[in-house]
Image (spheres, rainbow, N blue to C red):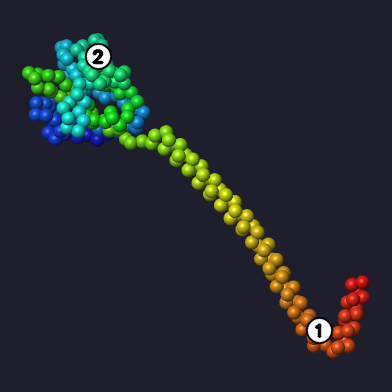
Amino acid sequence: MRNFTLITVLLLCCLSWISVSGSEFQTVEVQPGEDVTMLCSNYSSVPTQITWYKLVKRTQPHCVSSMFRSTDPAKYCDGFKSGKFEMSSNVYTLFLKIKQVDLSDSGLYFCGFYITKNLVIVDATFLEVQEGFDGITKLILGGLTVFLAMVVICLAVKIKKLQKESPMERDLDSDDLKDAALSLYLTTIRNRRPESERQVETRVIYAASR
């Protein structure tokens, strides 16, 4: 998590009627489909209406949920009543849990209360949901991975097979050259002999073949 001063961010993106308690906020990065829980200090020793807000791209903060006492059930504002958001509290801390986050959940979440129509912020968390792969993309990437693995294996087997066959082919080529050289040598020797000796040799070879 990275810490940034809350004052700097609110000067850039909040309205002038929002006050700041001087605290810092954290950036939390999560993947789509994960659950995330954000914390807020229970700063009041007496019952006080404490509210979680969401701020996105310099828009006016939207109420997420609120609670008067830690023993009271949380009240959820419009747009956050689907059961995806869950607010709870103990003596010291308030919690806001978001189930199975998606990209639309990214934004600045903070808790606070009103004093004479001014919103005082206590703690804040910038939630950043990372862009992930959907099911179809994962399936395509998985298929490509398997296909490439099969291609690599086939190429490796083929190369290994060629490496085994190469010495044999070289031996066969060498034997062919030797046979050709010997045949040429014998032909040359026979051509240099007298006609009578070549006839005798022919008869001997013919008789031997029979």
| Tag of residue 190 | 1
- SS of the residue under disc 2: loop
Q: In the image, residue 37 lies at what x, y percent?
A: 29, 24
Q: Nearer the viewer, residue 68 or 25?
A: 68
Q: Nearer the viewer, residue 167 or 117?
A: 117
Q: In the image, residue 42 lies at what x, y percent?
A: 20, 18
The image quadrant that residue 38 belongs to is: top left
**Residue at x-position 50% and y-position 46%:** 148
User: From the viewer's perspective, is 187 left or right of 48?
Assistant: right
The image quadrant that residue 134 belongs to is: top left
- Separation of marks 1 and 2 at Cα, in angstroms: 114 Å
Vertical side of 97 occupied by 28: above or below: below
Label 1 vs 2, first from the N-terminus: 2
Residue type at mark 1? Arg
**Residue at x-position 85% and y-position 89%:** 194
Quadrant in which the N terminus is drawn: top left
User: From the viewer's perspective, is 187 left or right of 17?
Assistant: right
Q: In the image, residue 157 lies at what x, y percent?
A: 59, 51
**Residue at x-position 35% and y-position 26%:** 100
The residue that label 2 is drawn on is: 74
Q: Are marks 1 and 2 in contact (CB under 8 Å)?
A: no
* Residue 33 visible somewhere in the drawing: yes
Quadrant in which the C terminus is drawn: bottom right
- SS of the residue under disc 1: helix
Residue type at mark 2? Ala
